[in-house]
Image: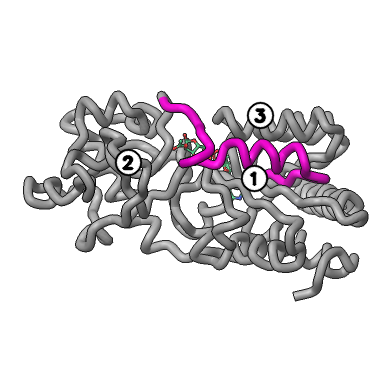
C-alpha cells in the first residue's frame, strides 16, 4: 500500500515537472512538436502494433505485424495482406478518438501556427478528433486510403464502399478483391501505408516536413511509441542535437526516455488519455497559448 502511494507521488511529480518544462520552452513563442504512436489509440480500443494482439494467422502460420507490413509480403500474398488491413481498418473505424486525441486538438487551437503533430498511426483518429490536415503529418500513411500498387499515379483514393466492417475470419472473395484496384490503370491497389521495406518520402509521407518541424521545435512531446522506427528516432535525435527538451509520455520504458534524460526533459509514465489532458490544463493555467 505504502509502495503504491509512493509510486503515485513520484509519477505526479514527474508529470508536473514535465508540464513546467513544456511551458518554459513555449513561453517565448516557440513551437510545440508532438510525436504520437499506437499508444495514444490504445484507450480507443485499437491494438498497439507490437502488443499481444498484433499478430495474424494465414493458413496454419502465425505472423507478427512486422512480417506482414512489407511490400515483399504484399507481392507474395496480396489477398491475405489486404484481409489483414481490411480487418485492422474495420477496428480503426469502429473506434472513437479518446481524451488524448482531443487534448491535442485543444493544444493545436491554443497554439495557432506553433503546433505540429507527427503521427505514426494509420488509424485516422487524430483527424477524426479534429486535428487539422495542415498540421498533422501522417508519416506512415492512413489506412482509409489506397493507392496504385504499380505507382501509375501518386494519387490517393478513398476505399471503395462495402469494406467498412471486416471480421478477422472474413474471406475476401474474388468479386471483392477485384474491386481493390487503381481507378486510373485498373491494376492492383494497395493500402496507403508505409511498409518496413520501404522508404519515407515527402510527397506521400511528409518526411521532410517532419524533420523541418523537429529542427524548429522548442520542445518535443513523444506519446505512446516504442521508438522502433527510423524517422521518429531521427526526429528525437534532431531535437536533442538542437539542445531542446524531450518529454516522453508512455505506460512503459522506451528509447525516448533516454533522450528525455539526455535533454533535461522528463519521462512521464501513465496513460496518454489521462496525461495529455493534464498537459493541456497545465498550459492553460500557466497562460501558455490562447485559451480555448
Ligand atoms: P508499438 O505497438 O510498437 O508501441 C506502442 C507503445 O505505446 C509502447 O511503447 C507502449 O508502451 C505504449 N502504450 C501502450 N498503451 C499506452 C497508453 N495507454 N498510453 C501511453 N502509451 C501507451 O507502436 P508504435 O511505436 O506506434 O509502422 O509503432 C510504430 C510503428 O511500427 C507503427 O506505426 C507501424 C509499426 O511498424 C508502420 O506500419 C510503418
Residue at screen point 59% across, 57% down = 134
Q: Quadrant of residue 282?
A: bottom right
Mark 2 and ligand 1: say if the CB distance to the nearest ligand atom is below 8 Å.
no
Residue linked to disc 1: 35
- Looking at the rendering, the stretch of residues picked out in magenta corresponds to 198-223
Q: Mark 1 Cα within 10 Å, few/some/many (few <14, many 20+)?
A: many
Q: Position of residue 198 (x, y in %)?
A: 42, 27
In the rendered structure, find residue 149 and report the number of the disc placed on it.
Answer: none
Where does residue 181 sit, x and y in percent of width and height? 19, 46
Q: Residue furthest left?
A: 174
Secondary structure category for the residue under label 2: loop
In magenta stretch: residue 216: yes
Asked whether mark 3 and ligand 1 are closer than 8 Å, the reply comes as no
Indicate whether residue 255 is drawn in magenta.
Answer: no
Q: Along the horizontal axis of the image, is 193 left or right of 264?
A: left
| Nearer-the-camera pick, 28 or 70 | 28
Marks 1/2: CA distance?
Answer: 29 Å
Residue 183 visible in this rendered orientation of the protein: yes
Q: Is residue 159 left or right of residue 5?
A: left
Q: Which residue is mark 3?
A: 234
Q: How many marks?
A: 3
Amino acid at each position: 500500500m505504502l509502495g503504491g502511494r509512493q509510486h503515485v507521488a513520484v509519477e505526479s511529480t514527474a508529470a508536473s515537472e514535465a508540464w513546467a518544462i513544456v511551458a518554459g520552452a513555449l513561453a517565448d513563442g516557440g513551437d510545440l512538436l508532438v510525436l504520437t504512436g499506437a499508444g495514444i489509440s490504445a484507450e480507443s480500443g485499437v491494438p498497439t502494433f507490437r502488443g499481444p494482439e498484433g499478430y495474424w494467422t494465414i493458413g496454419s502460420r502465425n505472423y507478427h505485424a512486422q512480417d506482414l507490413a512489407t511490400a515483399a509480403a504484399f507481392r507474395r500474398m496480396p489477398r491475405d495482406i489486404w484481409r489483414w488491413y481490411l480487418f485492422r481498418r474495420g477496428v480503426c473505424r469502429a473506434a472513437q478518438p479518446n481524451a488524448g486525441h482531443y487534448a491535442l486538438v485543444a493544444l493545436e487551437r491554443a497554439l495557432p501556427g506553433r503546433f505540429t503533430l507527427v503521427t505514426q498511426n494509420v488509424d485516422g483518429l487524430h483527424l477524426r478528433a479534429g486535428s487539422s490536415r495542415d498540421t498533422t503529418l501522417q508519416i506512415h500513411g492512413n489506412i482509409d486510403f489506397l493507392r496504385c500498387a504499380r505507382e501509375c499515379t501518386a494519387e490517393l483514393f478513398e476505399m471503395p464502399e462495402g469494406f467498412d466492417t471486416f471480421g478477422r475470419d472474413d474471406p475476401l472473395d474474388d468479386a471483392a478483391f477485384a474491386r481493390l484496384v487503381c481507378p486510373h490503370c485498373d491494376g492492383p491497389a494497395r493500402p496507403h501505408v508505409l511498409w518496413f521495406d520501404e522508404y519515407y518520402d515527402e510527397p506521400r509521407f511528409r518526411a521532410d516536413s517532419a524533420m523541418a518541424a523537429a529542427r524548429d521545435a522548442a520542445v518535443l512531446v513523444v506519446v505512446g511509441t516504442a521508438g522502433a522506427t527510423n524517422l521518429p528516432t531521427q526526429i528525437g535525435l534532431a531535437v536533442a542535437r538542437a539542445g531542446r527538451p524531450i518529454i516522453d509520455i508512455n505506460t512503459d520504458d522506451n528509447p525516448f526516455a533516454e533522450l528525455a534524460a539526455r535533454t533535461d526533459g522528463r519521462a512521464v509514465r501513465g496513460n496518454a488519455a489521462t496525461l495529455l489532458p493534464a498537459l493541456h490544463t497545465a498550459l492553460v493555467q500557466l497562460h501558455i497559448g490562447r485559451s480555448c
